[in-house]
Image (tube, rainbow, N blue to C red):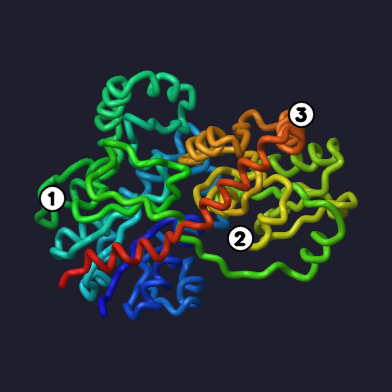
C-alpha cells in the first residue's frame, strides 16, 4: 500500500474534502498524511489520519485577520501574497513530510507542495475545489472584485482569453517569492503558480459536482470532475432536534467557518428580516455573539455550530456566504438557497446555483433587512425553487466524490 500526502490550506471548507478522501484511502489500506496548518490537527487525527503541521498557522478565530481576507475587492490578492511571503517556511515543513511519501495531492494554493513534488521527483495530483479555479474562457467565473465583469467575459471566449492573459501579467508579482524559491532549489521557473502552474500534468481532480460546473474545452488535460467529497460527522443536539420538531421548517443562517468571523451586521439584519416575515429561524453564529439579543423571539434559535450535513435537510431556505463547502452541503440537502457572497469564489458559486434555479443572490455589500426579507419571501413563496433544489439534491447525492477521487489517486500511484 502507498504513502499519500494530502496538502491543504484554509478554512474547514478547504480541509473537509481532503479528510473525506483521506479516510477513503485509509479504508483501502493506504497510509495517509494531511499536511496543513496546526489548527486542524485535532480534526485530522480524530479520523485516524496522520498529521503534519505546515506554516503558516492561521487562526480561524482571528476576526481582524478574517475581516482582512474577506474583502471582496482585495481579499484574494491578500491571501495569495500572504502565502507567497511565507512559501519558504511552508516548503521546509512540506519537504519534511514529502520525503516519506509516494505521491502528493495538492490544494490550489499550496504552492510549496508543488515545488516539493517537483524537487523530489514525486508524482503529484492537483485538485480544485470550485469551478472558478479553472478560469475558463468558455465558462467564465464571476470575479469577486468586479462581478459586473462577468457580462463582458461571457460575450465571447476570445474576450475572456485576452482578459485572462492580462490577469496573468497583473498577478505575477503576487507570486514572486514562489518563483524565487523555485530558482533557489534548482527548478526552472515553470508556469504561473496561480494559473497553469497549479495543475498537475498527470491528473487534475475537480472536487465538485458536474451540476455546478460542467466540463469545458479549456480545462487542463486529464481533468475529472469527481463530485463533492463529503465529510460528515456530527449529530444534531437534543435541543436542536426539539426545536425542529416544534414547528414548520426554519430558515437556517450560516456564514461557514471564515466569513462568520467578519459577519458585521449580517445576523442582526437577518433577525429583523425573519421577524418581519414571521419565519422560524436557526442562526449558526460561530464563536461570536454577532450582536444578537440574549433573549431571542419565539421560534428563533441561535447556536455556535451544527453539522451542515445534519441540519440543512430540515431547512425551508438556507442562507449562506457561498463558500464551496457550504454550497456543496446546501446543494446536497435539496433545499433552496439565498447566497450572500463576501469574497473569493463565493460570488461565482452563488451565480452558479442561481443559474440552476435553486437560489437567489444578494451580495454582502447590499444585504439589508428589506432586501433579505424580499429575497426570502421569493424563495419561500415561488413554487419553482423547491422542486428544482430537490432535483439537484438527488443528483448530488448520487455522486461518489470521495470514492471517485480515491480511484483516480490509486491509478496515478507509481507501480
Q: Which label's residue is closer to the chain start, 1 or 2?
A: 1
The residue tagged with tag 2: helix, strand or loop?
helix
Point out the tag, 1 or 3, that comes first from the N-terminus.
Answer: 1
Check the image and report above or below for 284 versus 341.
Answer: below
Q: Which mark is residue 183?
A: 1
Q: CA distance from mark 1 to mark 2?
A: 44 Å
Look at 33% across and 54% down and name the residue there.
205
Could you say which is closer to the camera, residue 219 or residue 388?
388
Point out which mark residue 237 bears.
none
Neighbourhood count class around disc 2 (C-alpha, 10 Å): few under 14, some 14–19, many 20 upward:
many
* Residue 70: x %, y % from top left: 52, 42
Q: Would you call the spot at circle 1 few (<14 residues within 10 Å), some (14-19), or many (20 or more)?
A: few
Other residues around mark 3 within 10 Å, as few (<14) / some (14–19) / many (≥20) = some
Give the residue at mark 2.
309
Q: Is residue 31 left or right of residue 44?
A: left
Mark nearest the camera among 1 and 2 is 2
Of marks 3 and 2, the one in the foreground: 2
| Distance Cα–Cα, label 3 vs label 2 | 29 Å
List the residue tagged with mark 3. Answer: 370
Between marks 1 and 3, how big is the CA–CA gap? 54 Å
Amino acid at each position: 500500500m502507498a504513502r499519500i500526502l494530502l496538502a491543504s490550506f484554509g478554512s474547514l471548507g478547504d480541509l473537509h474534502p481532503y479528510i473525506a478522501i483521506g479516510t477513503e484511502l485509509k479504508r483501502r489500506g493506504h497510509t495517509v498524511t494531511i499536511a496543513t496548518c496546526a489548527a486542524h490537527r485535532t480534526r485530522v487525527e480524530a479520523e485516524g489520519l496522520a498529521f503534519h503541521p505546515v506554516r503558516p498557522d492561521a487562526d480561524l478565530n482571528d476576526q481582524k485577520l478574517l475581516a482582512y481576507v474577506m474583502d471582496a475587492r482585495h481579499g484574494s490578492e491578500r491571501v495569495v501574497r500572504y502565502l507567497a511571503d511565507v512559501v519558504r517556511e511552508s516548503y521546509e515543513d512540506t519537504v519534511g513530510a514529502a520525503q516519506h511519501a509516494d505521491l502528493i495531492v495538492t490544494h490550489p494554493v499550496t504552492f510549496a507542495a508543488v515545488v516539493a513534488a517537483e524537487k523530489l521527483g514525486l508524482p503529484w495530483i492537483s485538485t480544485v475545489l470550485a469551478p472558478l479555479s479553472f478560469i475558463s474562457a468558455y465558462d467564465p467565473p464571476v470575479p469577486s472584485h468586479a462581478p459586473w465583469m462577468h457580462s463582458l467575459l461571457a460575450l465571447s471566449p476570445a474576450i475572456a482569453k485576452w482578459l485572462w492573459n492580462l490577469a496573468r501579467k497583473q498577478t505575477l508579482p503576487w507570486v514572486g517569492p514562489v518563483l524565487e524559491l523555485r530558482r533557489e532549489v534548482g527548478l526552472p521557473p515553470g508556469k504561473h503558480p496561480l494559473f497553469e502552474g497549479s495543475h498537475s500534468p498527470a491528473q487534475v481532480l475537480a472536487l465538485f459536482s458536474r451540476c455546478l460546473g460542467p466540463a469545458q474545452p479549456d480545462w487542463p488535460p486529464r481533468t475529472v470532475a469527481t463530485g463533492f467529497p463529503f465529510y460528515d460527522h456530527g449529530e444534531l443536539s437534543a435541543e436542536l432536534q426539539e426545536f425542529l420538531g416544534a414547528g414548520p421548517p426554519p430558515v437556517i443562517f450560516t456564514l461557514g467557518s471564515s466569513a462568520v468571523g467578519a459577519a458585521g451586521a449580517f445576523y442582526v439584519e437577518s433577525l429583523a428580516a425573519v421577524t418581519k416575515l414571521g419565519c422560524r429561524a436557526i442562526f449558526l453564529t460561530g464563536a461570536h455573539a454577532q450582536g444578537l439579543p440574549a433573549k431571542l423571539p419565539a421560534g428563533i434559535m441561535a447556536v455556535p455550530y451544527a453539522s451542515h450535513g445534519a441540519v440543512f435537510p430540515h431547512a425551508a431556505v438556507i442562507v449562506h456566504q457561498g463558500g464551496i463547502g457550504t454550497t456543496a452541503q446546501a446543494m446536497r440537502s435539496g433545499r433552496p438557497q439565498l447566497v450572500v457572497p463576501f469574497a473569493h469564489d463565493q460570488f461565482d458559486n452563488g451565480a452558479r446555483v442561481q443559474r440552476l434555479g435553486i437560489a437567489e443572490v444578494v451580495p454582502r455589500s447590499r444585504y439589508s433587512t428589506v432586501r433579505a426579507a424580499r429575497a426570502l419571501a421569493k424563495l419561500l413563496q415561488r413554487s419553482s425553487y423547491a422542486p428544482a433544489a430537490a432535483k439537484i439534491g438527488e443528483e448530488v447525492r448520487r455522486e461518489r466524490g470521495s470514492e471517485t477521487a480515491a480511484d483516480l489517486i490509486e491509478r496515478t500511484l507509481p507501480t
